[in-house]
Amino acid sequence: MATEMAEAATRVVDLVVGVAGDTGVTPGIMTTGEMLTLAVSRVGYDIYTFQTNPAEIKGGQAWYQLRLSDQQLLSQGNDVNVLIAFDEEGFEKNEKVLADGGVLIYDASAYEPHPSREFRLVGVPMTKIAREQVRFPLAKNMVGLGAAAALVDLDLQVIRRMIEQKYAAKSMEIVEKNFACVELGANYVRSELGLSPIVRLKPIPRPERLVLSGNEAISLGALAAGCRFFAGYPITPASTILEFMMRELPRFGGVALQMEDEIAALASCIGASVAGKKAMTATSGPGLSLMVELLGLAVMAEVPVVVADIQRAGPSTGMPTKTEQSDLNLALYGGHGDAPRVVVAPSSVGDAFYTAIRAFNLAEYTQGPCILLSDANLANRKATVDRPDSQGVKIVNRLLAPESDERLPKPFPRYQITMSGISPYAVPGMKGTYFVATGLEHDEYGAPNYTPEVHTAMSHKRFRKLESAYANRNGDEWVSLYGARGEADLGVISWGSNEGVIREAVAQANAEGYKVAFAHVHVLNPLPEKELKAFISRVRRVMVAEINFAGQFAHLLAGRFKIDPIPLTKVSGTPFTPQEVLDGIRDAAA
Amino acid sequence: MTTTVTTEKTTGQPEERFDFKGMIEPVWCPGCGDFALLNAIRSALRQMPEVERQNTIVISGIGCSGRVAAYLGVYGFHGVHGRALPTALGVKEANPSLNVLVMGGDGDGFSIGGGHIPHAARRNPNMTYIVFDNEIYGLTKGQVSPTSPKGLAGKSTPEWPALEEPLNPLAMLIAYNVSFVARVYAGSPKTTTQIVKEAIAHPGFAVVQAMSPCTTFYNTYKLWAKQVRTLPEDYDPTDRMAAFARALDTETMWLGIFYREERPTYEEMIAQQAARLRGDEELSDDERLRRLIDSFV
């Protein structure tokens, strides 16, 4: 709590910029946002974005939100201070989030806005400048970018380098035309309109940091963990992991395949893991639904495998480009029979790198499936993160049996009953450790066996492995605690990508005099019982915050800890804002 | 539990060859064609010195024949119904040095798993798929399968004979451009051994339709004995149109190699792409990762 409050107090710059428009009319809406993000990050500021791509194949209203600050950012923020709206619909759809007195930068050659509240109107004839002065109408978005840069006093040369990175390979002419648009946009604001900057983004000297999306962080973490086989099937919003792995994994001596469906994707990952490789697939809800039978196979045959589910909204095809946390029940319970599996959830872009490593470590340790539950919001949004420490993290590999050179080997007890439940693994190529991995119930040697004794003992073994993983977490933090340290009036519990926004809201609530504690759960199965019991015992009331309708995690905690939590849920397809969580805390505490 | 047999290696030196028997005895019905096929496959493996026990894995589906993974004494993976092919593909691409054998029945391969065959054919991994085809569902006790003849009443569904035309697996495999397509019959064990050897030796995706009468639910020994004929000696297995003609001749159950074509395997193509992406620079994985992370600054 102290840290958050201290940071809030010393924050000099905290600005939210929104970019809106129809991508069919103005190409490069997202590029405008991304370039501004990278440029701001390059001069040393923290960034936190939120974006929704239109669901249309071409065209449709896009939204790119960028919050920037000289201090660490935990959420995308609430209201927008600067709105760049390229067309009237983009303005009208987003007018409600523009703060009173906020700045509206608009394309004066496209429309004249009729705002219902008081804003500072900055009309720049973007289309006209791009068409008449640069003869490159495609780059009208760059005129808007230049106008915004002038208003925050951002060094244009930094933007030039971004443009060079993106277009230099195509042609220098394109670079020059784009940059001319940026300069003309900036000059128009400064000279024609005579406006001075609303904030000055002076460079902050600090070590270079990375700008990553959640999907990129997961992919990098997987590589660091030793993933050397990936198979996937295109699905929004997980496809960028498939694309990343197909580009990068072969460089590391691995194999990445685009399969014919999600079933084949997980099947081939399980096959690769049987052959000894660390394997991962990435999908979204519809794909995970198809994979549940194979999850059971990985449990029964005891094969390590990581399944990243980048959740999207709704059942069936739902809302593919929108965010939700409604696959929790599927991840925890999906499939027939008692099939225990590990479930982990990244809480931020930076954490996604380490959560991917944790997912591989737990899959390897337990010799079974580990589901990583991310979401569309985390998948796409960019954030500044410290350079990940790939050397300092612990990498776990499956327990391997020693190779036997006996000429007539004894049967190999691949499914040996042990105290921890973990049995030595063997891979083809090893001598003397022959066995059949099987989805049938089996004895210690893998021979089919349907006796009551064996099914009971093997069920215990499979569940015991997860208990052992929890007992052996060795300082790995499965729950993060924030806010009030001792007794509290309200304890918020959440999981997944909500961590930052809730930290921010809890800090604000405590600053207002409420007494609120916050526990963020990183491993959802096996549930960190001790930590949660201790947390629940020191708060008067529990509130569980999650982005789904039914309150899936709240139900789980209610049953497990015999509590009656207050659900804080939403299903708008968008993440929580700090304000929404703060309102929830105020209601619950009232 | 395991024994060895002595065979002559090509060098003339006697070598102790593993007998390719597993810990478990088959649980099939007496007279099941799968016994003869299993023995023919064992003979083929024994006759191939390049097939080493520790480098061989059988991936099987669910069904009577799916149990074969446990009967060969090599590594095995008895997975879920219909997914043996993509599972095997993962094994093969993760470790291309393994001999990967895929086995299962007509229900497993042509019904629930039928969608995976064209994609395996497109990729052409160097692995061998033997489909034990008895034209019936045996393990679930006698329902009609995708290769059951039209009008066949399964023993468990006598009131409802099959209304569906049977699939023509060979024509389908040739159309999918599988690079090695053959048919064998449990009643012709010597030919079976020979063709299985050729299928395993084929550098690419080889599919063998292995006709296996089910003595319990659909006993076709007498029927098929009248229908089988070996492809003529002058038959050219590189002629795809001729292969179609023989496959579409459903009056005769032709046995032999219908079609074979050598083209690059998936493993070879993947290795080429990977070499291109990797470039010439020798870098440790740690260094590669560091550089990749730096590219996000």
Image: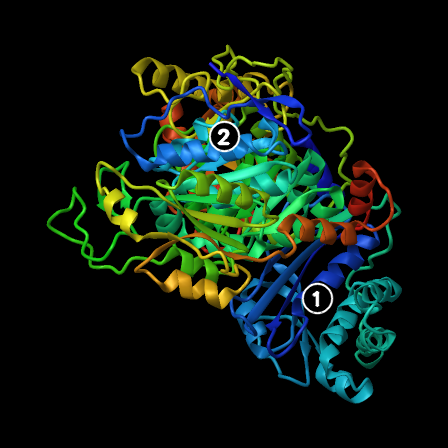
- The residue sitting at the top extreme is A419
Q: Please state if A481 lies on the left or on the right of B64 as rendered.
A: right
Q: Which residue does the image show at 55% across and 42% down from the upper left?
A: B200
Give the residue pinned by disc 1.
A31
Disc 2: host chain: B
Q: Please state if A221 lies on the left or on the right of A309 as rendered.
A: right
Q: Which mark is residue B76?
A: 2
Foreground pick, A170 / A264: A264
Label 2 packing within 10 angstroms: few (<14), some (14-19), many (20+): many
Compared with residue A413, is residue A589 higher up or lower down, i.e. above or below? below
Report helix, strand or loop for mark 2: strand
Compared with residue B209, is residue B9 higher up or lower down, i.e. above or below? above
* Nearer the camera: disc 2 or disc 1: 2
Q: Which residue does the image show at 79% across and 76% down from the upper left?
A: A185
Give the image location of residue A558, x and y in percent. 37, 29
Q: Please state if A118 lies on the left or on the right of A47 as rendered.
A: left
